[in-house]
């Protein structure tokens, strides 16, 4: 999801095509919980996008998934490793509401 230009449109399409009893499984890096790390994510993202195929470091993944009508059943968040601004992960399961 990090490099899709119109992420909301893409996740809406996932919601549209998923069977009513289906699940959206996602593992994605995105907006960290710590304000200091978020600051770095916001400042690194413009350069990072140029060097990494359009990747956004600071997308609020859970908010985006929920905003199009998914209910998040399970969500784990954690850093994979250093550097923190590039490694905050969201791993979850969502179902259509």
Image (tube, rainbow, N blue to C red):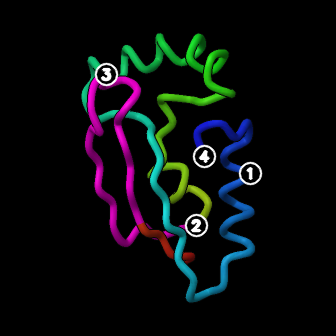
User: Mark 4 — residue?
Assistant: 1
Residue 37, image x, y percentages: 30, 21
Few, some or many residues within 10 Å of mark 1 (<14, 14–19, 20+): few
Q: Distance between the Cα atoms at labels 1 and 2? A: 12 Å
Question: Callout 3: 10 Å neighbours few (<14), some, many (20+)?
Answer: few
Q: Judge from the rendering whether residue 66 lies leftward or rightward of residue 50; answer left or right.
A: left
- The residue labelled by disc 1 is 9
Q: For marks 1 and 4, give the CA distance.
A: 11 Å
User: x and y percent of residue 77 in the render?
Assistant: 29, 48
Q: Which residue is mark 3?
A: 83
Image quarter hosting the C terminus: bottom right
Name the N-terminal-most of marks 2 and 3. 2
Along the polypeptide, which appears first: circle 1 or circle 4?
Answer: 4
Q: Which residues are magenta?
A: 69-92
Give the residue number, with chain letter if any, for mark 2: 69
Looking at the image, which residue is at 67% across and 45% down? 7
> Is residue 67 one of those drawn in magenta?
no
Who comes first in sequence, dot 3 or dot 4? 4
Mark found first going from the N terminus, 2 or 4:
4
Examine the structure image and report whether residue 71 is included in the region drawn in magenta. Answer: yes
Q: Counting other residues with Cα less than 10 Å from the Cα at mark 2, is it few (<14), some (14-19), or many (20 or more)? A: some
Contact (Cβ within 8 Å) of mark 2 with mark 4: no
Query: Does residue 66 sit above or below 28 in this rendering?
Result: below
The count of marks equals: 4
For the point 67% across and 77% down, the residue is 18
The residue at the point 70 percent across, 60 percent down is 12
Hey, which quadrant is residue 73 in on the image? bottom left
Q: Are marks 1 and 3 in contact (CB under 8 Å)?
A: no
Judged from the image, the secondary structure of the residue bearing numbered disc 1 is: helix
């Amino acid at each position: 999801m990090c490099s899709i230009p119109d992420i909301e449109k893409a996740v809406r399409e996932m919601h549209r095509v998923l069977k009513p009893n289906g699940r959206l499984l996602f593992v994605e890096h995105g907006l960290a919980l710590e304000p200091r790390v978020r600051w770095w994510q916001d400042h690194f993202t413009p350069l990072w996008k140029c060097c990494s195929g359009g990747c956004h470091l600071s997308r609020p993944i859970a908010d985006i998934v929920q905003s199009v009508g998914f209910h998040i059943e399970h969500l784990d968040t954690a850093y994979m490793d250093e550097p923190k601004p590039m490694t905050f992960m969201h791993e979850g399961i969502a179902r259509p509401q």
